[in-house]
Image (spheres, rainbow, N blue to C red):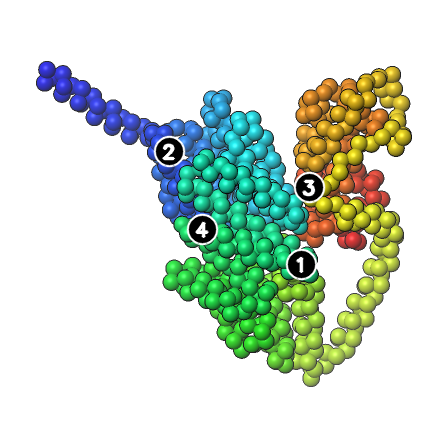
Amino acid sequence: MRLIISFFFLLLIYSSGAAQTTGELTEQKYLELQDKIRFSINGNLDDGLNYVRQLQKSKNVKHLAFAYGAGSYLYQLKNNNSKSDEFYTESIEYWNKMPESKEKISLRAYLYNFRGLTEWKRKNYSKALTNYQEGIQLSSQINDVIQIVKFKSNIALVNEKVGNYRLSIKYLRQNNDFLDKNENLYEKDQFQNNKSNINNNLGNAYEGYYMKNRNRVDLLDSAEYFYKKAITYSQNFVDNTINAKLSLGNIYVFKEDFENAEKIYFDIAIYAKQNNNENYFQIANFNLGDLYFSQKKYDKALVFLKKVDSVKAKNNIIDNSYFKSNYIQAKIYSAKNEPELAYKHSKLYLDSYEKYEGNIRDEALEVNYKLGTADLSEEMVAVQEKYKYEVFWNKALKIFYVILVVGIVFFLVKNIRDKNKAHKKMNALIEEFKANLEKKEIGKEEIKVPQLEEIHFKKENANLSIDESKENKIVEKLLALEEKLEYLNPDFTLSYAAKKIKTNTTYLSYVVNKRFGKSFGEYSNELKINYVINQMITNHLYRKYSTQAIAESVGFKNAVSFAKSFRKRTGVSPAQFANNI
């Protein structure tokens, strides 16, 4: 009997040892590490990568796919692009080895989310949106409601980033209500984290909306309300707390509540100093410098702005705080009538901006709104030229500046003449789109079904006839797809749309031809081009994109076909249209 017991005891030890040597993790341990990794994203990134390494010891391809996918985003948060790409490639390779199952679909949605967040961090918003759209389709297949909410929140953030603030607010409020009604679906920390993020994002959306509507002071009240709620839910998430507090401080500045703003910025600067967090230390010191500058306390502002420069000198990293710091210092020295220093800092701003322009285009709008200027670079050029002239007056540069001004005037006159034709062609089109934008209200758009007398019916499929009520139903469903921006999908073909609205391609082609007076391909291309025109008119950032990037963002296979369709619609190329708005 003892021998039998000993045998089973040894067998148990051997089995345990074998499981450990093969690197297998229990499902419970896998889920625990998943949660730890997720929470580390809003906390300690190094802890998160440590949990990833623990998961990488597993031989289970599911565990490895998630580990490398999460690691990809964590490395991106540490600004390690190459490592991020390497990890994401690995995650997809492991995912491909999984057998077909609901679990595989769910994991792919998670990987789309990680990649979307990575592209967001890189400021590739169109690519981020594509990943979110792919992910939400997969999550809908398996009815993963929690993951769908995450994707909708991320899509709302994309809308916010490109200036669609009211649409962003609408989506975020819907998700916020859903969370409140379904708290039981979440773990406590998970619920708190989601509420923290959504309230912080709502604050951002209202703040951005205010930047475009400075007369709407009530928007600041809404932003303040949601930032305070975000802080309440962020007690266990340090990064969330600091981000919400920084944003709340900005709201206090807008409201000229300088005392509360100053207190928040000092608290964050002290925290950052104690925890050796140079990123938050730099941001807090810039905000303090900006705060004192707005109060015309120039000497006090310079103390904190120089700390921003010292962090840059130590790490040799040029970020937005450094750009904005030099901008404000140039303004201060200009006001203090110290031309050499004004010239020095305007030159630092301009030189750095030229070198890193691609990395800060998206932030330029935020800086412009915050400081109330139309073009920071133009203002810095003016400061630089003014003081360069004064500093080197005795070095006979007066003639140089006269020639420079004449050259600029000549260039501007020539440029205006060259663009005059393009302006005339586009003027009517731009005014039409602007008028339409002013009429639209979120949630109140009326879906209009085109009537027979409004459209010239082509002769294609003329022999086919279907019931008018059925036609109307197909058109309504088609317009619903338009509302969801389905036409931005590269796969938005006649068969794709027919499948979506549950009809056949023959009927759909017939109805589009009859009601819209064009083929389905012409109809699809027109929607895409109209979307691009809207974005170019309303979003400064969108105009900076390359033709290829814009083409991809609206689902064109290549830039050539997109440019051809765009020119057919507007009479000019995308670049000419963007430059002449």
Q: Which residue is mark 3?
A: 443
Above/below status of 22 relative to 299: above
Sequence-wise first label, 4 or 1: 1
Which secondary structure, mark 2? helix
Q: Amino acid at mark 4?
A: Ser
Amino acid of disc 3? Gly
Q: Label 2, label 3: how many angstroms apart (C-alpha)? A: 42 Å
Q: Are marks 2 and 3 in contact (CB under 8 Å)?
A: no
Q: Amino acid at mark 1?
A: Arg
Q: CA distance from mark 2 to mark 4?
A: 25 Å
- Of labels 2 and 3, earlier in sequence is 2
Question: Does dot 3 land on a helix, a strand or a loop?
Answer: loop
What residue lies at 56% left-to-right and 29% top-to-bottom?
140
Residue nearest the observer in this picture, 561 or 268? 268
* Label located before the other in sequence (1 or 2): 2
Q: Is residue 19 left or right of residue 11?
A: right
- Residue labelled with disc 4: 234
Q: Nearer the viewer, mark 3 or mark 4?
A: 3
Residue 216 disc label: 1
How far across and how far down the image is residue 527, in percent? 76, 37
The residues tagged by marks 1 and 3 sit, at their Cα atoms, a distance apart of 20 Å
Mark identifier at residue 30:
2
Q: Is residue 525 above or below residue 428?
A: above
Image position of 301 with respect to 111: above or below: below
Quick check: can you spot residue 518?
no
